[in-house]
Amino acid sequence: MSRDQRRAVLKDFAKEYSRGGYNPDRPMTIFAFVQELSETLGKRSNARRASMAGAFAVKTYENTSKKYGYKGEQGPVHCSKGCGYCCHTRVTATAIELFMLARGIRERWHDDADPLKARFRQVESQTRRMPKDQWVDSRIPCAFLAEGSCSVYESRPLTCRTYASVSLPACIDWFNHAPVAVPQPDRNQLMRVFILAGMKAALNTTGLEAVGFEMGHGLEVAMTPNAEARWLAGEPVFAGVANDAQTARPGGRQAGHEAFDLMVKVFETGAFGKDMPPNPWFSW
Ligand code: SF4
Ligand code: SF4
């Protein structure tokens, strides 16, 4: 395909994307998300562009999910307010999501009477130096889990938003340490991989750190004075925070790191009309 043809195809994807997000049935429409997120992150005059990019990624996922998300083909989703077995684990989030979360809870954070803060401190003291596997095995509740519900629901990271189960009994079994895989809707899994790979591609494209940080410690860092501006300026503000690209959730995706990394490379190139590395999904 010639350069002009690629440009025309990308324009067409952008049009479709603007009408409701990336369409899993036309998966290359994710390129429009990568372009837009890269643009947001590239606006150097905007000192809040990291947290704004986090909020933009979240909004894109929510909009897309509404239009193209799972419609019950594999049975009803069992998730409900007050459930939360899946929230007894370690969560990671990218820097842009952490800055979004920091903005969402800044007022509560400065209120020492807010129970969120006491709980946060307690979980942090338990987990800060705990190896990842031990943390996951211990089923320690997330610092933000309050009476079975997420107390930062509006600002929760994508890894939480994109997780859903079609079997509450399987979630309970996981919680009780049974060796089960929690069944998740295929469509959700696809949409999750796309938004996470798209976010990572945009971060790489703009030269910013594209890893998932442990959420609690990462948030503490994101709340320090001028952390967002310092991170955008290239200061390694999250240097002491444990990071990894994988989050262990019941039935969570543990394998496929290489495929994910390839997908990120495909998004990084394809979104800008460049030659994509050989891959089993997309071609010009
Ligand atoms: S994933 Fe499982 S544990 Fe979490 S809310 Fe849904 S049904 Fe409940
Ligand atoms: S941030 Fe909220 S949704 Fe995510 S694990 Fe914690 S309590 Fe659960």
Image (cartoon, grey):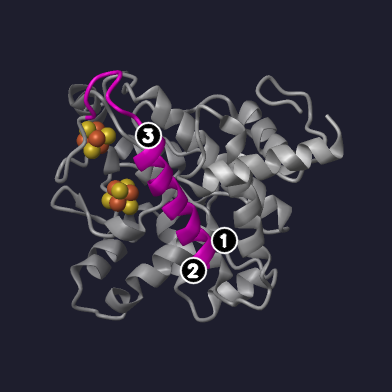
Going 49% across and 58% down the picture, which residue do you hit? 56
Q: Residue at x 24, y 66 (%)?
A: 116
Does dot 3 land on a helix, a strand or a loop? loop
**Residue 46 part of the magenta segment:** no
Residue type pointed to by label 1: Gly
Classify the position of ligand 1 by quadrant: top left, top right, bottom left or bottom right.
Answer: top left
Q: Give percent across and percent down for residue 95.
A: 54, 59
Give the crowd class for mark 3: few <14, some 14-19, many >=20 residues within 10 Å. Answer: some
Query: Which dot marks residue 69?
Result: 3
Which of the two discs, 3 and 1, sits closer to the camera? 3
- Where 26 falls versus 102 (above or below)? above
Nearest to the observer: residue 122 or residue 110: 110
Q: Check residue 240 in the rendering and tell me which mark sits there, or answer none.
A: 1
Residue 118 located left or right of residue 284 = left
Q: Which residue is mark 2?
A: 221
The answer to which image quadrant residue 185 occupies is: top left
Of mark 1 and mark 2, the one earlier in the sequence is 2
Query: Which residues lie in the magenta part?
Result: 51-77
Which quarter of the image is occupied by the N terminus? top right
Residue 34 drawn at (x, y percent): 62, 48
Name the residue type under label 3.
Gly
Residue at the spot x=48%, y=29% of the render? 190
**Rendered location of residue 272, percent (x, y):** 75, 46
Which secondary structure lies at badge 2?
Answer: helix
Which residue type does callout 2 highlight?
Val
Q: Is mark 1 within 8 Å of ligand 2?
A: no
Q: Are marks 1 and 2 in contact (CB under 8 Å)?
A: yes
Rate crowding at label 1 as few (under 14), some (14 to 19) or many (20 or more) other CA atoms within 10 Å: few
Residue 145 in sight from this viewpoint? yes
